[in-house]
Image (spheres, grey):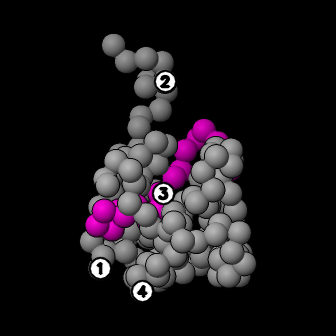
Amino acid sequence: MPGPRQRDKPARKTPPHSFILEALTPLEPEVRRLFSGYGVYLGDRIVCMLRDSAKSPGDNGLWLVLSESVNPADKTLRRAFPSLRSIALLRSKISHWLLIPSDSPTFEEEALHACDRLLQHDPRFGRVPKSRR
């Protein structure tokens, strides 16, 4: 028998922010349910997560995954993605995931810029999760 939470709101069946997946189509991304969103993988590397959840809506948007060699405080990232910030849900425990928030007035522009960087195989983004190593 379903619990009260399951009756209140059905689980999202499709990833949010579909324009991001459309932009990444040439790379044939694999999308997998992950925590409170959808992880986007290119080969073995997770590059981002798409999130739109009623719980902690301040963390909704595009979660970018930085590569091992990138400093999350890198000023060039902030210039390229002005609304980029840490993810409150992660409580600074995981610093290599950063958020472009969906409530930012420049969300679509910044998200598409991230897609352009991924299409250009920018080495700053993506890492192989421990589960896939």
Task: Please report contact status of discs 3 and 2: CB closer than 8 Å, yes or no.
Answer: no
Residue at 31 percent of width and 62 percent of height: 44
For residue 4, above or below residue 108 = above
Give the CA separation, mark 3 to mark 2. Answer: 22 Å
What element does badge 2 sit on? Answer: helix
| Dot label at residue 35 | none
Check if residue 45 falls in the magenta segment. Answer: yes
The location of residue 97, given as percent across then percent down, is: 57, 58
Residue type, label 1:
Pro
In the picture of the structure, the residue carrying the numbered disc 3 is 50
The location of residue 114, given as percent across then percent down, is: 52, 76
| Dot label at residue 5 | 2
Task: Please report contact status of discs 1 and 4: CB closer than 8 Å, yes or no.
Answer: no
Give the CA separation, mark 1 to mark 3. Answer: 18 Å
Instruction: Looking at the picture, tell me which residue is in the foreground, 85 or 12.
Output: 85
| Dot label at residue 120 | 4
Check if residue 6 falls in the magenta segment. Answer: no
Residue type, label 3:
Leu
Which one is closest to the eye, mark 3 or mark 2? 3
Q: Residue lying farthest top?
A: 1
What element does badge 1 sit on? Answer: helix
Residue type, label 2:
Arg
Instruction: Looking at the picture, tell me which residue is in the foreground, 110 or 10.
Output: 110
> What is the magenta range?
41-58
In the picture of the structure, the residue carrying the numbered disc 1 is 26
Instruction: Looking at the picture, tell me which residue is in the foreground, 109 or 117.
Output: 117
What element does badge 4 sit on? Answer: loop
**Lateral position of residue 55 relative to residue 25, left or right:** right
**Lateral position of residue 66 relative to residue 76, left or right:** left
Specify the quadrant that holds the C terminus.
bottom left
